[in-house]
Image: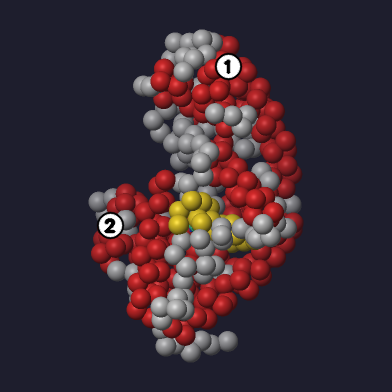
Amino acid sequence: MQVVSGIQPTGTPHLGNYLGAIVNYVKLQDEEEKAGRKCLIFLADLHAISMPHKPAELHSATLEMVATLVACGVDPSKTVLFNQAQVPAHAEMQWLLTGTARMGWLNRMTQWKDKAGKNREGASAALFGYPVLQAADVLLYQATHVPVGDDQKQHLELARDIAQKFNNDFASEDAPVFTLPEPYIPPMAARIMSLRDGSKKMSKSEPSEMSRINLNDDADTMAQKIRKARTDPEPLPSELEGLEGRPEALNLVTIFAALSGSTPEAVLAEHGNQMFGHFKPVLAELLVEKLGPLRDRFVELKEDREALTAILARGASQARELSAPTLDSAYKALGLVRGR
Ligand code: TRP
């Protein structure tokens, strides 16, 4: 098992990033460490240039996300933690794989269709090639398991297709260049929705600050956001079926369950029949208890650019070493003599 995953360095991280992705990184990191292996987690800063972005903010956003990951428990001595820009093998491998990826495959990617919208002619070639870079990210390290959200499954299938075709076209059957990676959807991955609209994912791009709990919110702000979260006037049901058609209520129960390491069923068994006036303060208290210490670590670490830079430098040097053999074999398989 080789775990590799990437996360975009986008702005201030929120509860959705934490419960949806980061908690699972930490769990995998600790399980893998027991088995004598290291996960690779990287900041996808090269991917960030596929959309309009602010160059002056990209590196700070990257550092901020590193601070988040570490504050939340990703341990740079157990996990190889780095950013793509410091490991040229990612960009090199992407180019090698563009010879194998087919236009038709990329044209079918829903993220490409969504992000390019009606203006495909004006979209960047980087946006079109985005999934090829993502394939390079994981194939470089012979990844077997790639923790991702549901929306990234299609990109992982594409990475498999690219790996398979490359192996077919350029490698002998008994010495494939790439391992076929699989998406790993963690069993407990919580999908956290906006506090204003239970049908939308919690996201930093939603204009209202009240829609999300940011990891740097202080205790009062967190509690206030929960208090003001949209709900309905009904009490909580005591069983899951009772939450059907009540996305906001389901969301608060999901958050409660994820924070307490429990399940929505168990939360309802305990808090069923409560009104939100009663449930929300309990949830707010739990949130502050769990997130408060992470917040304090995050706020402190965020200011320590030197420490963050050192973490990334160390991770990058490990990643460069780990990626070298596969990059070498890919060059060789294609008939290229690699420069040094
Ligand atoms: N595209 C992923 C996202 O938006 C981020 C990402 C980039 C990634 N490269 C990756 C995830 C490789 C897993 C593996 O969430």
Dot 1 alpha-carbon crowd within 10 angstroms: few under 14, some 14 to 19, many 20 or more:
few
Q: Is residue 121 left or right of residue 199?
A: left
Q: Residue at x 46, y 76 (%)?
A: 177
Q: CA distance from mark 2 to mark 1?
A: 45 Å
Q: Residue at x 37, y 54 (%)?
A: 154
Residue 44 visible in the picture:
no
Dot 2 alpha-carbon crowd within 10 angstroms: few under 14, some 14 to 19, many 20 or more:
few
> The disc labelled 1 sits on which kind of residue?
Glu
Q: Nearer the viewer, mark 2 or mark 1?
A: 1
Vertically, is 154 above or below 247? below
- x%, y% of residue 180? 44, 65
- x%, y% of residue 11? 55, 46
Mark 2 vs ligand 1: CB under 8 Å?
Answer: no
Does dot 1 land on a helix, a strand or a loop?
helix
Vertically, is 35 above or below 202? below
Q: Which residue is mark 2?
A: 108
Q: Which residue is mark 1?
A: 270
Number of labelled discs? Answer: 2
